[in-house]
Amino acid sequence: MRATKAMGRVGLSSHVVPPGCYAAAAFGEYHQVIEQEERANKVVLTCASKTDVRTAPAAMTRSPRRFHLLGDSGAYTNWRRERPSKFREWFAWARDFVSMALPLVATIAMIGLDVIPGHPQQPLTRAHIEDAAQESYANWAEANVLGLETLPTFHQGEDFKYLHQYLDAGVTYLCLSDRGSKVVSGLKECWRHLPSGTRVHLLGATDKDVLSAVPAYSGDSSTWMQMGKNGPPKGAVCGSLDTLTWRCKAKPR
């Protein structure tokens, strides 16, 4: 086990966060949009990451117990930049972020540190997928041992034995990450392995075609930010923060 200091067991509200689409980067460059929602006294579902440490506390303090917060690990951003996340650094940030945010938000859930297979500029191999799946599970298990409950991530293309490994460990709320062009068919295949009542968060997915095809509990996306740049993206649910409380048509099975 890595030499990482354990924290007291944190009772994160990962099973009571409201269903809907969470706004990625809402406390970052576009935090002024969040402020508009605060003034309008609307419920805001937000998704925060390491870049939000400086801007999130002020917004939370102004509107205590109003934000429903989903903490992202930043693994995908670091993967794109070819700077793999390190467990000890991520855990230290997550521990401090939870301690700061927990008294200030309505609900909070944290996404665990998954390992994305392969490299952005190289062909993906089966060995890459297998190694990443094993590391993702090890990170999730160690965070849990150290007192931080997180949502694990199963990537499409991984052996379903890893999905069942999480389910056998008692996970009832998890993330699915799509790869490739056959997103809907791949997600439907994943759902055939899920017990009734499992809640699923779709990473980077708020497309209506996807959310209408599978009974997802929640999803996150940064496409809502495009509204201020280029107008609403075709097929996106998140045209503005008004629509972020849109709920998936299908109920969790």
Image: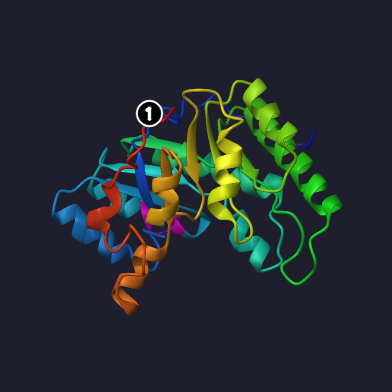
Is 15 placed left or right of 186 in the picture? left
Between 102 and 37, which is closer to the camera in this rendering?
37
Q: Is 250 left, or right, of 210 in this rendering?
A: left
- Vertical arrangement, residue 3 with respect to residue 42, above or below: above
For image coordinates 62% across by 54% down, the residue present is: 75
**Magenta segment main secondary structure:** loop
Left/right of residue 143 with respect to residue 69 in the rendered view: right
Amino acid marked by disc 1: Val
Q: Residues within 10 Å of mark 1 (few under 14, many from 20)?
A: few
Task: List the single residue furthest toward the right.
Answer: 127
Image: magenta residue range: 52-56
Q: Residue furthest left?
A: 40
Q: Position of residue 201 (x, y in %)?
A: 48, 42
45 in magenta: no
Local secondary structure at mark 1: loop
How are the colours assigned in the image? Answer: rainbow
Quadrant (top left, top right, bottom left, bottom right) of the C terminus: top left
- Seen at 26% across and 63% down, the residue is 33
Does residue 80 appear to the left or right of 241 in the view shown? right
Q: Whole-percent x and y of residue 143?
A: 65, 33
* Residue 80, image quadrant: bottom right
Residue 206 seen: no
For the N terminus, the image quarter is top right
- Mark 1 highlights which residue? 16
Which quarter of the figure has residue 167? Answer: top right
